[in-house]
Image (cartoon, rainbow, N blue to C red):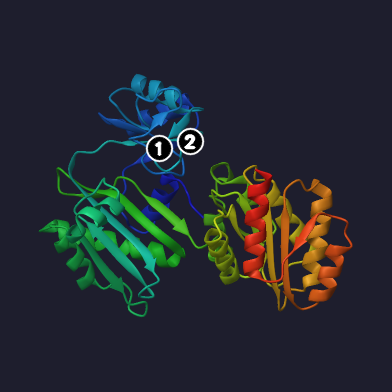
Amino acid sequence: MNIHEYQAKGLLGTFGVAVPKGGVAYTPDEAVAVARDLAGPVTVVKAQIHAGGRGAGHFAGDPGGKGGVRICKSNEEVAEAARAMLGKVLITKQTGTEGKEVKRLYVEEGCDIARELYLSMLVDRAVGRVVVVASTEGGMEIEEVAAEQPEKIVKEPVDPALGLMPYQARKIAFGLGLEGKQVSAAVKFLTGMYQAFVQLDASQVEINPLVVTGEGTMLALDAKMNFDDNALFRHKDVEDMRDEDEEDPMELEALRHELNYVKLDGNIGCMVNGAGLAMATMDIIKLYGGEPANFLDVGGGATKERVTAAFKIILSDPNVEGILVNIFGGIMRCDVIAEGVVAAAREVSLHVPLVVRLEGTNVELGKKILAESGLPIVSADNLADAAEKVVKAVKEAA
C-alpha cells in the first residue's frame, strides 16, 4: 500500500526524522490558510498524487506549462497555484499519458538548499535483509544513477537481530560527504527512519531529495513510503491512510475479494491458483507470442463466489481479448473452479475466447461441468496446449 507525501512525512516525523513544516489542503482557501500559519518568505505548493516526477510533469492540455511543485512568495501566489492544480490532471513519467487528477495539495515551508542527497531503505531479497541505499546524487531517479554512476551509490545491509548500528549510520554519512555536526544529525535521521521502517512494517522508505540546508541541518524534502499489505492488520492508523482514488479500481475490487491481482498491459487475461503457477502461465503466454493482461492468483482455497468475482474482474478490463484459466487442483477443487467460471461467463455474457486447463482434484467432474455448460469453452490438455490455443484464438478473433 502506498500513501501520500504529507502522510509519509507525518509518520516519519513521529520517529524523529526531520521534515519541513506544512499542512494538507483541499481547496485554495485552505492552502492560503496553511501558508499564513507557516508565515515564511517562501512557500512550496505540491500536488499530492501517488507518482514521482511531479515537479517535472505537466497538466493535461498544457504540455509546456508548470508542473505539480510550485514555489510561491506570497499568499496570492499560493492561491493561484492551488487553483491551477486542484481538479486538474497531472501527467508525469510514472503516471503514463492518462495522468492522475489532483485532489489534494501539500503546502510547506521553503528551505535554503545547499545540497541534495538520496536516501532509502528497502527489503533486498537477494540478501534477505533491509538495505540502506544512499547517494550524493539527490533529486535524480536512483535508477539513472545506478546505470550511469554506480560508484556514487552506497549500500549498507542491516542485521535484523541488531538493527541499524550507529557505526553503520556514520559510515553512510561519511559516504555522503557529510562532516562535523552533520554526521550526528545523519545518525539521528537514519535511526529514526529505520525505526519507522521496522515498526510500521514498511516495504520501502525513500527520501529524495534529502537536503542539507545552508545552516547545515538535514531535512526530508520529499518522502515516499510503501507498506506490506499483509501486515496492515497491525496498523489500522496506516491502513486508514489508503487513498482509493489513487488505486486501480480492478485491483481494489480484487482486494475486497481477497484476490491477488495486478493489472498488466497485455490482452490475454489469466486466472490461476498459486503465485508460481501464475508466473509460469504468464511466461508461457509470452513464449507463444501473446501478452498477459494481468497477474491473478485466486489462492488455494477459493470459493465459487471468489472465482466468479475473479472472472468478472478480468472481463472488466477492456483490453482483454481472450482468457486462459489454468488450475492445478490440490487444495483447490477443479469442480469449484468450473462452477465459478460457468456462473461468471453466463452472468457477464462471455464475448472473448476462453481456454481452460484443469488438473488435480475432481478434474473429471470439473471438465464435465464445463462440457455440459453449453458455453464456447476450449479445453486444453496441458499448459503449453492451453497457451498455444488462447494465443491462436485471440489472433484469429482480431
Which image quadrant for residue 119?
bottom left
Residue 72: percent from left, percent from top: 30, 26
What separation in Å lies between label 1 and label 2 (alpha carbons)? 7 Å
The residue sitting at 67% across, 71% down in the picture is: 382
Residue that sits furthest to the left in the current view: 180
The x and y percentages for residue 292 are 57, 55
> Does 44 appear above or below 381?
above
As shown in the figure, which amino acid type bears the numbered disc 2?
Answer: Gly
Which picture quadrant has residue 237?
bottom right
**Vertically, is 167 above or below 257?**
below
Count residues near mark 1 (Cα–Cα under 10 Å), then give few for <14, some for 14-19, many for 20+.
many
Q: Residue at x 41, y 45 (%)?
A: 5
Callout 2: SS? loop
Of residues 297 and 71, the one drawn nearer to the viewer in this rendering: 297
Q: What residue is disc 2 on?
A: 99
- Residue 179 image point, x, y percent: 10, 58
Question: What residue does disc 1 label?
Answer: 92
Q: Which mark is residue 14?
A: none
